[in-house]
Amino acid sequence: MIVRDGNYHEVDENGLLAQDASHTQWYCLKRWFRFRWQKFRWGFDERELWNLNSAISRFALPRLKRFKTMERTGYPAGLDSMDAWNDIIDDMIYAFEVEVDSDTELDETARYYRGHAHFRKYWLGLWD
């Protein structure tokens, strides 16, 4: 119970007034339906657009990791060896890990920017 305007009001376990709690629940329910509709209609909802670089990083990271472990038959033109290609993929993975996991320390700033530069340069080479 709290006193507001000289009257006693019921509060829930979060300290919200009863009418505030029902309004919050209704608002959350409406947002849930809106996000579901967007996901059905577009294949994604607008929450992914609020931080698009993070959404792209979350999509690319597990695929880059799997791409590195699979048996590949070649590497992009202009590279000397498969080892050089693997080093480039490692840089890309590091850059996306920093983007996705906020707990990952940015130990090597140059490697982070190099990984994104490699992704821009070699993204058409990410096939086998």
Image: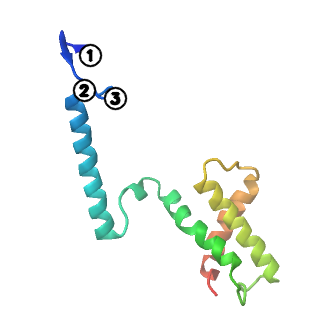
> Is label 2 or label 3 in front?
3
Q: Earlier in the sequence, mark 1 or mark 3?
A: 1
SS class, disc 3: loop
Give, as a three-letter code, the residue at label 1: Ile
What sort of colour scheme is used for the picture?
rainbow
Taking the spot 65% from the left edge, 64% from the top edge, the residue there is 116
Give, as a three-letter code, the residue at label 2: Leu
In the image shown, does 27 or 21 lie closer to the viewer? Answer: 21
Q: Residues within 10 Å of mark 1 (few under 14, many from 20)?
A: few
Instruction: Report the disc number at residue 30.
Output: none
Q: Contact (CB < 8 A) between labels 2 and 1?
A: yes
Q: Which x, y percent locates residue 48?
A: 42, 58
Q: Quadrant of residue 4?
A: top left
Circle 1 sits on which residue? 2
Q: Contact (CB < 8 A) between labels 1 and 3?
A: no
Give, as a three-letter code, the residue at label 3: Glu
SS class, disc 1: strand
Q: Residues within 10 Å of mark 2 (few under 14, many from 20)?
A: some
Circle 3 sits on which residue? 13
Q: Residues within 10 Å of mark 3 (few under 14, many from 20)?
A: few
In the image shown, does 102 or 116 lie closer to the viewer? Answer: 102
SS class, disc 2: loop
Q: Which x, y percent locates residue 62?
A: 59, 68
Instruction: Report the disc number at residue 17.
Output: 2
Check the picture and name the quadrant holding the C terminus: bottom right
Taking the spot 25% from the left edge, 56% from the top edge, the residue there is 33
Q: Which x, y percent locates residue 50?
A: 42, 53
Q: Earlier in the sequence, mark 2 or mark 1?
A: 1
Indicate whether 2 appears above or below 23: above
